[in-house]
Amino acid sequence: MIRQSFHQELMQLEQELIRMGALVEDQLRRAVRSLTERNLVLARQVIAEDDRVDAMEMDIERRCLTLLALQQPLASDLRVVSTALKIITDLERMADHASDIAKVTVRLNQEPLIKPLVDIPEMARLASSMVRLALNAYIHRSIEEAMTMIRLDDDVDHLYASVFRELLEIMRTRPDTVAQGTYLLFVANYIERVADHATNLGEWVIYMVTGQRKELND
């Protein structure tokens, strides 16, 4: 009965974690959309939802600590719970970055963009896909899915380098664009950081399955 109760509570914990991850993924998409569409209402919604993610993190952390304290999980189950604790930390930081992007939308206040946004939305699409793939890897206990997700980080890094070079060139030749260009560089960096956190999720999934912690984000 004790083991059955443990696994029921573990399933509930994992369902909450997946809900948190889905919310974070959606926040990133909507934050970048708020920027590309100059949508201040959407941006403020994303900012407000950061508190909801924080509350979810605290609730899942409480569930994890209760399981550890009361159920004395076996080694494999212990890794599942400890992995959940690590994952929610990365998810919370991703939500912070989505909120940061939305704050840039508000700061620019519908100011015309100095260039069409192409690579930044593509970076966000890839980073969002990485989060979704990482969560699938967690659900399926799949090293293969985790590795597939981690490889997408290189694509995000290449786009980030392209955005960085292009914006610096625009700011160099047009001094009046420096302020906005700097904010757009911040946005690209926030998305690149989301991809790094998604890579962390993949690394934690691999640890959960194998018991070995490997740094794959170099």
Image (cartoon, rainbow, N blue to C red):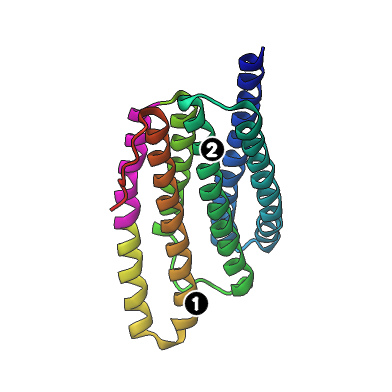
Residue 6, given in percent of the width and then of the height, sits at: 63, 21
**Which residue is at the front of the view, 83 or 32?**
83
Q: In terms of image quadrants, where is residue 159?
A: bottom left
Q: Nearer the viewer, mark 2 or mark 1?
A: 2
Residue 146, given in percent of the width and then of the height, sits at: 37, 34
**Which residue is at the front of the view, 87 or 123?**
87
Q: Name the residue rendered at 61%, 16% in the picture.
A: 3
From the viewer's perspective, tell me whether residue 125 is left or right of residue 10: left
User: What residue is pinned by disc 1?
Assistant: 180
Relative vertical location of residue 91 with respect to residue 165 in this rendering, above or below: above
> In what element is the residue under mark 1?
helix
Question: Is the residue marked by circle 1 packed among few (<14), some (14-19), or many (20+) residues within 10 Å?
Answer: some
Q: Amino acid at mark 1?
A: Gln
Residue 21, given in percent of the width and then of the height, sits at: 57, 40
Is label 2 in contact with label 1 (beta carbons under 8 Å)? no
Question: Is the residue marked by circle 2 packed among few (<14), some (14-19), or many (20+) residues within 10 Å?
Answer: many
Q: Quadrant of the N terminus?
A: top right
Relative vertical location of residue 33 with respect to residue 4 in this rendering, above or below: below
Q: Which residues are magenta?
A: 142-158
**Which residue is at the front of the view, 47 or 79?**
79
Residue 204, given in percent of the width and then of the height, sits at: 42, 39
User: What residue is pinned by disc 2?
Assistant: 84
Report the predominant secondary structure element of the magenta stretch: helix
From the viewer's perspective, tell me whether residue 29 is left or right of residue 188: right
User: Disc 2 to disc 1, how far (Cα)?
Assistant: 38 Å
Q: Amino acid at mark 2?
A: Ala
Magenta-drawn stretch contains 156 = yes
Magenta-drawn stretch contains 160 = no
Which comes before the other along the chain, label 2 or label 1?
A: 2
